[in-house]
Amino acid sequence: MKGALSQYLPILEWGKHYNRGQLASDLLAAVIVTIMLIPQSLAYALLAGLPPEVGLYASMLPLIAYGLLGSSRSLSVGPVAVVSLMTASAVGRIAEVGSMGYLDAAVLLALFSGAFLLLMGVLRMGFLANFLSHPVIAGFITASGIIIAVSQLRHLLGVHAHGDNLYEILLSLAEQASHTNLYTLAVGLPVLIFLFWVRKGLQPLLEKAGLSPFAAAMVSKAGPVVGVVMTSVAAVAFDLGAKNVALVGDVPSGLPALRLPPLHHEAWQELLISAIFISVIGFVESVSVGHTLAAKKRQKISPNQELIGLGAANIASSVSGGYPVTGGFARSVVNFDAGAETPAAGMFTAIGIGLAAIFFTPYLAYLPKATLAATIIVAVLSLVDLSILKKTWDYGYSDFIAVASTLFVTLVAGVESGVACGVFASLALHLYKTSKPHMAVVGEVPGTEHYRNINRHSVITHDEILSLRIDESLYFANASFIEDRIYALLEDYPHTRHVVLMCTAVNEVDLSALEALEAINERLGERDIALHLSELKGPVMDVLCKTHFLKQLTGKVWLSQHLAVTGIVEEMNQHKADNTENWDI
Amino acid sequence: MKGALSQYLPILEWGKHYNRGQLASDLLAAVIVTIMLIPQSLAYALLAGLPPEVGLYASMLPLIAYGLLGSSRSLSVGPVAVVSLMTASAVGRIAEVGSMGYLDAAVLLALFSGAFLLLMGVLRMGFLANFLSHPVIAGFITASGIIIAVSQLRHLLGVHAHGDNLYEILLSLAEQASHTNLYTLAVGLPVLIFLFWVRKGLQPLLEKAGLSPFAAAMVSKAGPVVGVVMTSVAAVAFDLGAKNVALVGDVPSGLPALRLPPLHHEAWQELLISAIFISVIGFVESVSVGHTLAAKKRQKISPNQELIGLGAANIASSVSGGYPVTGGFARSVVNFDAGAETPAAGMFTAIGIGLAAIFFTPYLAYLPKATLAATIIVAVLSLVDLSILKKTWDYGYSDFIAVASTLFVTLVAGVESGVACGVFASLALHLYKTSKPHMAVVGEVPGTEHYRNINRHSVITHDEILSLRIDESLYFANASFIEDRIYALLEDYPHTRHVVLMCTAVNEVDLSALEALEAINERLGERDIALHLSELKGPVMDVLCKTHFLKQLTGKVWLSQHLAVTGIVEEMNQHKADNTENWDI
């Protein structure tokens, strides 16, 4: 009973053994992650088209909820780039940016998303995430990175470009480029260059200066905070607001009010569909990070428990005025590298963000939006990895088609369509391949009991025995293909008296395939050719034994291909000997 | 070149050798099929909600078009039950029964359907039909039979019942039952009983009377014509029209005018979707019949050429004022049994129907609709086969779910939804199964080189070697499942130093699975366990050779599981001997 409870409340497990050493590690990690998260939360809220404080709200209660229910010890939950982009796109379809309805819709989206994740978790549907292949994930993350980076250029230039896909955004940017606010650019461009340098060049420099690699890495994570402080100071000093440089402006100070989001939003059906997509994408991102980090420490995460943890986090985000959250890649890696040992690190981070929300917000008024845009661009460009195209191109056409179609459709039609298209393409290609399975005529590798493809190995065959290996389960989609293939092969092997189907790769025989086998058995029988099966697996044999097929079979079922061939040869010799005897008499 | 041409125009092939014997056989078959087709065409037009002459029109030109282009020698093309039901449902959604728009829409549906079939044929997409499993086909045919039979009861009772699904039709029938026209019932019920008797009892009786089984079978096919003639005579004799018995009424006499259907119909998008469904269903019905009949004569049909033949038939139907057609089951079997040798039989049938349209239509005015309804009921009840439920229940849950969901959804929501649901369910179940593949720890069957499941066979194993057979291709949907399973198994086999993955059933390794294998290799390496692969198939080996994986592999790739185990044991002994030597020194 207690085991079952701690399965659903992982905190009972790790909390029992919590010690001072872990506390110290978790606190250090929390400080580092808090410093990194403050500019990031503001920036992602901007990306989602929401007021900056919403980013902070989404970084408090969700961390506590996930800490209580999540199964990963290192995951850091909060606003992330792709989900922010998807939120902007989903909410933008039904409300104007900046309007009250827009914020309400985003909060509602988090509620729906949380409810859906919880439902999936209770129904133990975590396995569904497996249907997003690595190429599809790589494709939509790279495409999202490109879209986000390009869309943030307008804040860097201080123009009002907009658009629903890459082409529209680029066109709009090109049109607006002449209206560039040079003061804004003078703030944004240096910050962008500074942040790129921090990411690439600062850490080695600090290490040279004598810092430990760990300290150097952690200090360089604070780069965005330096950018925030410097540009805010510059904005005050040069009165940039008066020069039309967009600033964050007044941010309400204090903690969010807890309230249920308004449920009367008219377009809730459309929001629900978007919430499903956001949930799935967020879950997949979170689980991939969680798996990677857990593996490094020989820990495990449970996908179904993750669904519950993320569901609770999203509901917590919603009731505290936040928007959809998930386990972010960058922040989780920082949390892990900073030494977080338990989910308590996340809870301490929540407290850190809370303190920032209470004491720090007045200073945000002068923060230029261009600084946040630069933060986003630097963060998302690290997600862009076009080498996956080359890699899949070299590897195989179906992976390439999956990644290319996901990438392309995401760029022109958004993440939801891109992912849907990628999943559909990869499943369709997989099914297409299994519907036309590889089949090999096999023969004995000399000196062994092993049978291999006659076209790839020099093997021993018998004129009267056609040994055929079917490289796929037999099911409705390939049943008639296999039937036709066998008849066609018999024309190439006219002396065949025995066909042995080597079923090493046959993991299933469904009813359609059974009917095809019955038809093959009957038609071969009419031509006086016996049908044999070899190496049938246990589960397949169990199913076939329930039918009449094995009784109707003109040949036999053999344990192995070798036994089949030697057995048939023996029978034929016996038969020949019998005939000779008869003839003698 | 000539071979290529006759591939697309099968008539060039069989026409070359056409002889007097074939002509005689084809003519006889044509006479029999014509007699059978006349009432059937009228009845199916009634079922589709169309004027009776439309059924005749759909039985002329389409037969000639199919005869020129189709690849089956016995298929008889024309109106069929399921397609008529689907036409009624598709057209009924956008037009009132009996209105001019209704007829236009049905004609347009045939045009779209024909164009779609042609397109599929040119793109060689015939393989798509394989994705309709036998249980799905059985499910929707049985459900359609039930719906059609029940819906025709209203004509038998002479009431105005209607509804979009079985429940609504039954409810409406129950409400209207009190308005039953007893004269109508007095016509319909005897015909119904007569037709059932003809189907079951007449043939044995005729055989007893001395007719050959062939003649007896052919004469009993004329049963519906007898019903038509008798009830028409009765209608005139007793002036049933005045007693509110619904009669067919005036039917325009002569051949249809050739014209392009009006393309200005407003709801063409909805029609297009229905046309796609009708095409697919019609194609599947046609190909199954075609395959069955061709196999009996050792002939072959080409699915892609069938698409072209059926496409041409539907376009021909459309330009001559007909509605969607396909290769029907009952009529094709009659055609085959009556001795049709070539598609010329179909062309002669077309001429027969044409003559009937010219000379016979005036006599149809007095034909009671109840007679046609009885014809339909008797025909479709032979399609109803609920035993498939029991058969699949015994066989396996996924086939049962496919048939039950198709049957149920077709009954409550129509053929299109039913088939879509069935295809989705069967694909989803197949993918689900492959996402959680069977894996077996295997050992050597004593005295052989064969390796089988340790739980099913008494086999020889080694403590330090874990031989694991994976019963599925490795692809994105099962990559992480397999990874987790291997780690879990290692906890059960703590002495393992070598893991050998026996890849007899691995027909593919996609990029996601390759990444999983790399992760497994690395994590096993950290624990000082070597990863080996055995029995990799040629195509899989080709793909892996293009990557760095085989170089990173901590173990080796072995030709067979037996070579792997003996090789590893030898190496371990060698190693032990080496260590002993070192220790000695």
Image (spheres, coloured by chain):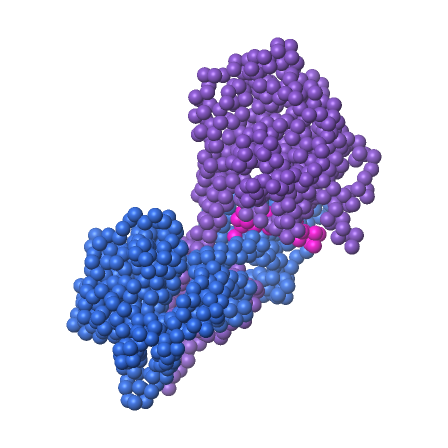
Chain colours: A blue, B purple
Segment tinted magenta in the rendering: A472-496
* Residue B248 versus residue B55 in the image, above or below: above
Residue A253 lies, in percent from the top left, at 20, 66
Give the residue at the far right of this rendering. Answer: B20
Look at 48% across and 64% down and name the residue there.
A168
User: Is most of the magenta stretch helix, strand or loop?
Assistant: helix
Residue beneath the point at 43% across and 72% down: A179
Left or right, residue A60 beside residue B394: left
Q: Return the residue found at the far left.
A: A20
- In the displayed image of the protein, which residue is found farthest to the bottom? A209
Residue closest to the eye, B505 or B374: B374
Q: Is residue B340 above or below residue A273?
A: above
Residue B460 appearing in the image? no
Residue at 34% from the left image edge and 48% from the top image edge: A266
Task: Say if the magenta span includes residue A3.
Answer: no
- Dividing the picture into quarters, in which one does residue A318 lie? bottom left
Image position, residue B288 (x, y; %): 61, 40
**Is residue A161 visible to the viewer in this orientation of the structure?**
yes
Image coordinates of residue A8 in percent, x first then y, are: 25, 55
Viewer-side residue, A155 vs B114: A155
Query: Is B183 rendered above or below residue A208?
Result: above
The quadrant in which residue B105 appears is top right
Q: Quadrant of residue B485?
A: bottom left
Residue found at x 66% / y 51%: B122
In the displayed structure, does residue B57 sit left or right of residue B508?
right
Point out the image quarter for the N terminus of chain B: bottom right
Quarter of the image where the C terminus of chain B is located: bottom left
